[in-house]
Image (tube, rainbow, N blue to C red):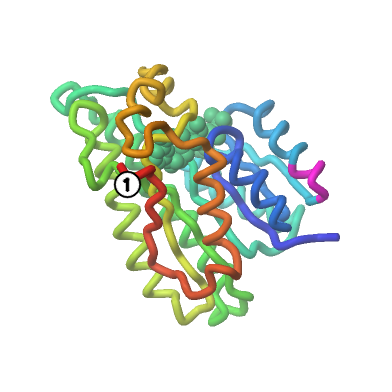
Amino acid sequence: MTGKVLIVTGGSRGIGAATCRRAAADGWDVVVNYAGNAAAAEAVANDVRAAGRRAITVQGDMANEEDINRLFATTEAELGPIAGIVCNAGVTGTITRVENMTTEAMRHVMDVNVLGVMIANREAVKRLSTKRGGSGGAIVNLSSIAPRIGSPNEFVHYAASKGAVDAWTLGLAREVAGDGIRVNAVAPGMVDTDIHASAGAPDRSARLGPTVPIGRSATPEEIAEAVVWLLSDAASYCTSTILNVNGGR
Ligand code: NAP
């Protein structure tokens, strides 16, 4: 039995991987995009298949327009038209003060977190819009608590990139609300994933978890619940929402 087709960018690890697994439980066939970790992506795809859904893995750098186009083309060729996309792939860059940031590091964060999301959202809209012959669908972008706190002394460029995601989500949602497309974002606080080690602080989640009002970091699964709910028909009246899932932070 085939389900509705969902692309999850950065689906190989962390929140993206949890989203792929949770989406499969909700009846989605899943495209697991990844940047470099093919083994992790294949493990997630196997879990989706074990849940009785179709799954493929597609390598692709979400900062690269050609790769994004290839992700959509491969999806359509192998699984058929999409009904949803989760633009989850994201990077913080290495923790550092602004005066020490290289332009290259700032550009990379903006390319992955902002331009990549914009391009992937645009390509999804072209395919989903009922005004263009599509069947409608749902887009969920991963934002963060960062635009509200600014992330000083850590990654201000990352906070700025997620602020852009929030504004984009709001505007696009209103633009395509009449096209059968809902566009929302989930804004997590501290989540226990590899992203902190990639930023250069492997202990960050354990160290800062106790400072969150709820007393701990989130699991990726707790964020995936919100993402998959926003994709679902249960969220049929939700669009332009930034859903905070942050333990009160
Ligand atoms: P993560 O554990 O570091 O995993 C990142 C995922 O994104 C991996 O699957 C990775 O693929 C993929 N990826 C990275 N760069 C990519 C690129 N250029 N193209 C395609 N895929 C790429 O991250 P996470 O913590 O789950 O974060 C997921 C999202 O949630 C991000 O947008 C992040 O900003 C947001 N978020 C996270 C937290 C948190 O505390 N963790 C809080 C707020 C918001 P490979 O496995 O192939 O490397």
Q: Position of residue 205 (x, y in %)?
A: 40, 25
Observer-nearest of 57 and 73: 57
211 is higher (above) or lower (below) than 227:
above
Residue under the image location 71 percent in, 51 percent down = 25
**Which quarter of the rendered picture does the N terminus lie within?**
bottom right
Q: Is residue 112 visible?
A: no
Going by the picture, which residue comes out furthest to the right?
A: 1
148 is higher (above) or lower (below) than 124:
above
Q: Quadrant of residue 130?
A: bottom right
4 is higher (above) or lower (below) than 160:
below
Q: Is residue 191 left or right of residue 213?
A: right
Residue neighbourhood size for the residue with mark 1, other residues' Cα within 10 Å, grouped as few (<14), some (14–19), many (≥20): many
Query: Which residue position is annotated with label 1?
Result: 162
Going by the picture, which residue comes out furthest to the front?
A: 214
Q: Quadrant of residue 2?
A: bottom right
Q: Position of residue 183 (x, y in %)?
A: 45, 65
Residue under the image location 65 percent in, 54 percent down = 73
Q: Position of residue 8 (x, y in %)?
A: 58, 48
Q: Mark 1: which amino acid?
A: Lys
- Please identify the dominant SS of the magenta region: helix
Q: Is the CB–ligand 1 distance for label 1 below 8 Å?
A: yes
Q: Position of residue 235 (x, y in %)?
A: 53, 68
Magenta region includes residue 13: no
Residue under the image location 60 percent in, 70 percent down = 233
Residue under the image location 61 percent in, 52 percent down = 7
At mark 1, the secondary structure is: helix
Q: Is residue 118 left or right of residue 166?
A: right
**Which quarter of the rendered picture does the C terminus lie within?**
top left
Which stretch appears magenta?
48-52
Q: Is residue 7 left or right of residue 156?
A: right
